[in-house]
């Protein structure tokens, strides 16, 4: 509700003072989906993710085997051996948590690899959008795939295919085949007018 209120106030304020402003929108997820390098990067990220997930599952299996063996033998073991095996299991669980964080955490290997592969493409798209906005006099270009809610948008203001053409790619289909804002993108969504 708060977003809608802010959007209404923004459009009312902008509409009164600058009626000649031009607006457009793009769908950066649609643009990315039509760039072959993005598809290859996504495949590479998926493969890495599966490989690392399998590595983690193997560690979980190892810990489970150790724990079951410990439970089976616990009655017969002397206290010092029990303590040693408990410590071993605890250490392996700690190592597993660290491995999960290293691979899939906020600043983990997958995040870094995604930044390495996807960020240059997002920057390229942002620069093409900025250039298009500057050359064609758009005051604002909204990203339909981001968190900004666009309740209605006339297809004629969708400039996604033009951005693809400016980048040297052809569209994968008509505008109606795009994901209607269900994807997410970390590309910059605003432009400054020169």
Image (cartoon, rainbow, N blue to C red):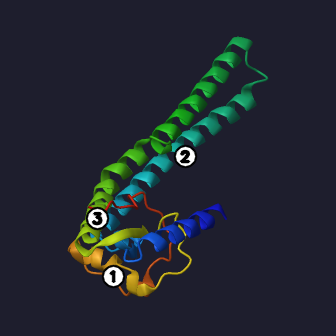
Does residue 7 lie above or below 71 as drawn?
below
Which one is closest to the eye, mark 3 or mark 2?
A: 3
The one nearer the camera, 61 or 167, is 167
Q: Earlier in the sequence, mark 2 or mark 1?
A: 2
The quarter holding residue 162 reads bottom left
Which mark is first along the chain, 2 or 3? Answer: 2
- Marks 3 and 2, Cα distance to the nearest angstrom? 44 Å
Quarter of the image where the C terminus is located: bottom left
Check disc 1 and report the residue beneath it: 172
SS of the residue under disc 3: helix
Is 38 on the left or on the right of 69, as rendered?
left
Left or right relative to 54: residue 79: right
**Which residue is depicted at the point 52% across and 63% down?**
147
Q: Residue at x 53, y 71 (%)?
A: 12
Q: Where is residue 131 shown, x and y percent of the image?
A: 24, 67
Query: Viewer-proximal residue, 108 or 179?
Result: 179
Rendered image quadrant of residue 47: bottom left
* Residue receiving disc 2: 57
Q: Residue 40 appears in which quarter of the rendering?
A: bottom left
At 57% across and 38% down in the image, what residue appears?
62
Marking on residue 130: 3
Q: CA distance from mark 3 to mark 1?
A: 22 Å
Q: Position of residue 176 (x, y in %)?
A: 44, 86
Q: Is residue 100 above or below residue 177?
A: above
> Do the CB atoms of the residues marked 3 and 2 lie less than 8 Å apart?
no
Residue 176 seen anywhere in this rendered image of the structure: yes
Q: Nearer the viewer, mark 3 or mark 1?
A: 3
């Amino acid at each position: 509700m708060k977003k809608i209120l802010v959007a209404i106030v923004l459009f009312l304020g902008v509409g009164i003072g600058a009626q000649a402003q031009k607006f457009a929108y793009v769908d950066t997820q649609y643009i990315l989906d039509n760039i072959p390098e993005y598809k290859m990067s996504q495949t590479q990220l998926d493969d890495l993710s599966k490989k690392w997930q399998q590595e983690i599952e193997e560690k979980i299996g190892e810990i489970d085997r150790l724990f079951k063996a410990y439970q089976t033998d616990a009655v017969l073991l002397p206290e010092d051996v029990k303590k040693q095996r408990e410590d071993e299991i605890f250490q392996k669980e700690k190592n597993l948590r660290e491995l999960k964080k290293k691979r899939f955490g906020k600043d983990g290997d997958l995040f870094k690899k995604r930044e390495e592969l996807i960020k240059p493409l997002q920057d390229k798209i942002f620069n093409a959008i900025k250039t298009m906005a500057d050359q064609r006099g758009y005051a604002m270009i909204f990203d339909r795939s981001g968190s900004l809610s666009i309740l209605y948008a006339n297809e004629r203001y969708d400039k996604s295919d033009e951005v693809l053409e400016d980048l040297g790619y052809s569209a994968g289909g008509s505008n109606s085949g795009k994901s209607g804002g269900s994807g997410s993108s970390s590309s910059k969504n605003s432009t400054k007018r020169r």
